[in-house]
Amino acid sequence: MRTGDALRLTAVLAAALVLAACGLEDYPFIYPVPQGSIRQYATTRSEVPIPTNNAGTTFTHFIVFYRIYVSDVLVSATSSSSSYSAINQDLLTDYNAIFPYIDSTTLVNTNMETLFLGRKFQYLYLQGADIDDVLSSGVLGRTLVFDFPSGRYPTLTIDGAVYNLYRSNGNGTFDLQPKLETQPLWYRYFVNSSDLSSSAYSYTPTNTTQNADVVNNSGASSYTYAAMYIAAMGVDNSTYTNIYSTPSLIHVFLLPDQWQQQQQ
């Protein structure tokens, strides 16, 4: 763990102890996934160890937000803000807006859905499974493995159980592109294509019905990347309202190309 990450994690734990010491044991608090514990590899893989400290709290499940960014740049690693700027300026802008919340001890219980949805992020889905159930108390103490390899669909793996990742369609409020007659649900997967990166299908103020999860690029467009963040969610038993942990960046993934995907 990097020194800065260790210090921020220590600050989070110290804040929780202060709350208890002040007689605020009932203060609704959900623990985040420490950013420093997440292991990111190149542009294709991330391992997210889930701590057990939310056991016995009002925790219900984790939520994952994502946004896809079109780019004309191929990078070998996406672990720094300099790479975000090279990929797409909007990726850097989003990261800079979210960064102050990561491991914060003062922005606790900020509404993460308001924060991310307000920035046009979408909820991550899974094929054939309810992600809220999959990321509930059963994942405490386990490791989430996100894979975006070439030649197959991006996946989430938990203790050998493998789930294909699905893009959101806003519960039917917008369409996803591209659509193929021979594979009608293919467009739900996180796969790069000329249609996905095309400005013709980009979400804009005048086109709000297609690819609302994609940020266009002003230059040439050959690649697409997905930024994913994770936060814990629970319910305040006194007010019955949702409460949230601070977020953590899972990774910025390079989407595999369509032609590779069609070889399956």
Image (spheres, rainbow, N blue to C red):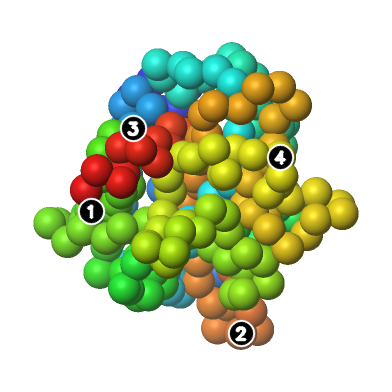
Mark 4 and 2 residues: CB-CB less than 8 Å, in contact?
Answer: no
> Does label 2 or label 3 sit earlier along the sequence?
3
Mark 3 and 1 residues: CB-CB less than 8 Å, in contact?
Answer: no
Residue at numbered disc 1: 157
CA distance for labels 4 and 2: 42 Å
CA distance for labels 3 and 1: 14 Å
Residue most extreme to the right: 206
The spot of residue 157 in percent (x, y) is 23, 53
- Is disc 3 placed on a helix, strand or loop? loop
CA distance for labels 4 and 3: 25 Å
> Does label 2 or label 1 sit earlier along the sequence?
1
- The three-letter code of the residue at mark 4 reads Ser
Residue at numbered disc 4: 199
Residue at numbered disc 3: 44
Q: How many marks?
A: 4
Which residue corresponds to the image point at 54% horizontal and 77% vertical from the top-left?
Answer: 235
Residue 179 is at least partly visible in this image: yes
